[in-house]
Image: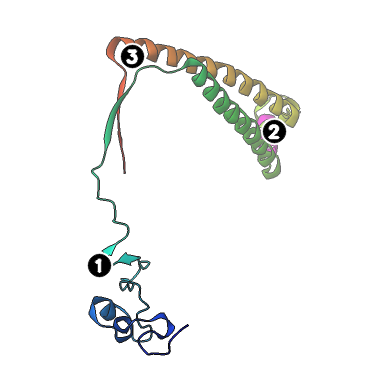
Amino acid sequence: MSSNTPSSSGGRTSAGAKGSGAAGKASSPGTKGSGTAAKAPASKGSAPRKTTGNRPLVRPAPRSKVRRAHLTVARIDLWSIAKLVFLLSVAVGIVTVVATVILWLVFEVTGVFNGVNEVLSMLSSQGSGIEITDYLSLGQVAVYATILSVLNVVLMTLLGIISAFLYNVAAKLVGGIGVTLTDD
């Protein structure tokens, strides 16, 4: 049972069809009012907001002040320092071994060892020179670098633990290091 009168056809009301009032001004000519509140025109660069009447559904949050927290590092866990320093020293050890092998290969390719052999043969009183690669072969250099890296891992881990222990003792006496954290 629908009537074909202009005021009720298609579910439009006469006020919405004419576009009068605040809702009519906000709607564009191609989209006449449909009985609901019209959308507010969107500003450039922002998504359109749903509105009820003249009020937006969601209000923007008020700008808050920057929060600051003043904290003190009162104690350092020895086990966490031991793990961290151990992993970092292992990484340094791997870099040391790889860099040593690469450096040896570069010296071999560029002829540095041949130049050192010539200098040693000129300085020696005997006619036969000493071959530097007899004492510094690639395998020997890699073994020495690995031994040095293992010693560095042990010493750096112990040094890290001792440093954390000394910090804990000093922090009990003077209060530790103060840190201020801010919320950006």
Instruction: Between residue 48 and residue 100, name the one nearer to us.
Output: 48
Would residue 127 be seen by someone viewing this image from the given angle? no
Q: Which residue is mark 3?
A: 171
Res 117 label:
2
Would residue 41 be seen by someone viewing this image from the given angle? yes
Q: Residues within 10 Å of mark 2 (few under 14, many from 20)?
A: some
Give the residue type at disc 1: Asn
Res 54 label:
1
Span shown in magenta = 113-121
Frontmost of labels 2 and 3 is 3
Give the residue type at disc 3: Ala
Label 3 to label 1: alpha-carbon separation: 60 Å
Q: Is residue 174 left or right of residue 111?
A: left
On the rendered image, what quadrant is the C terminus found in?
top left
Residue 22 place in picture, x, y as percent: 24, 76
Q: Tell whether position 130 is magenta.
A: no
Which is more N-terminal, label 1 or label 2? 1
Q: Is residue 155 left or right of residue 6?
A: right
